[in-house]
Image (cartoon, helix red, strand yellow):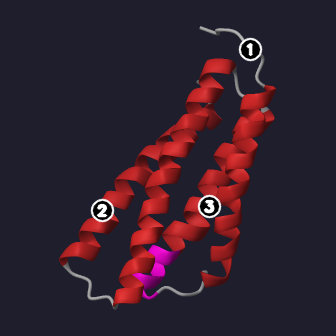
Amino acid sequence: MNAALRFFLVFACLSAALSIGVSAVAAHGETLSGQQAQALAWAIDLQRFHALGLLLAVLMARQAGPNRWTLLACALFVAGSLFFSLNIELRLLRGIDVFRPLVPYGGMAFMAGWAALALGGWRTPPGPRL
């Protein structure tokens, strides 16, 4: 596995683990309003979902060989996780608000990542690769 795919695999696993840790912190110590709790829950859910999407992209790249679209999808899922999910989590749990303008770009990165992954799958030649 090349270095980029290894990084994306590790990032996906750590992102999924972090989502569980953030859930525990929120459940056992943070007092959030109803709206803040809902926003945090959405951020955590999207983080988990896109950690799995990133794993899927890595597996696709390993199976068929990485192409520019699957690698772009991986990079966009990482950007989305950082700009959207982690950003919201830091703002709600630690009051770090400086990166708030990046949240919409994180959402766009998530959407673009899925489009890139679809293109990567479409552009992959058919047939088994071992």
Judging depth in this view, the residue of 118 and 58 nearest the camera is 118
Disc 2 residue type (three-letter)? Gly
**Secondary-structure class at tag 3:** helix
**Residue positioned 69% across, 60% down in the render:** 109
The answer to whether 16 is drawn above or below residue 107 in the figure is above
Q: Which residues are magenta?
A: 88-95
**Secondary-structure class at tag 1:** loop
| Residue 93 shown in magenta | yes
> Does residue 94 appear anywhere in the picture?
no
Crowding at dot 2, Cα within 10 Å, few <14 / some 14-19 / many 20+, comes out as few
Given the current orientation, which residue lies at the most extreme left position?
28
Crowding at dot 3, Cα within 10 Å, few <14 / some 14-19 / many 20+, comes out as many
Magenta region, main secondary structure: helix
x, y (%) of residue 112?
Answer: 73, 54
x, y (%) of residue 58?
Answer: 58, 33
Residue for badge 2: 21
Q: Quadrant of residue 19?
A: bottom left
**Residue positioned 34% across, 91% down in the render:** 33
Task: Give the CA separation, mark 2 to mark 3.
Answer: 19 Å
**Residue positioned 49% across, 49% down in the render:** 51
> Does residue 37 appear anywhere in the picture?
yes
Residue for badge 3: 80
Looking at the rendered image, the quarter that the N terminus falls into is top right
Disc 1 residue type (three-letter)? Pro
46 relative to 117 in the view: left or right: left
In front: mark 1 or mark 2?
Answer: 1
Residue for badge 1: 126
Mark 3 or mark 1, earlier in chain: 3
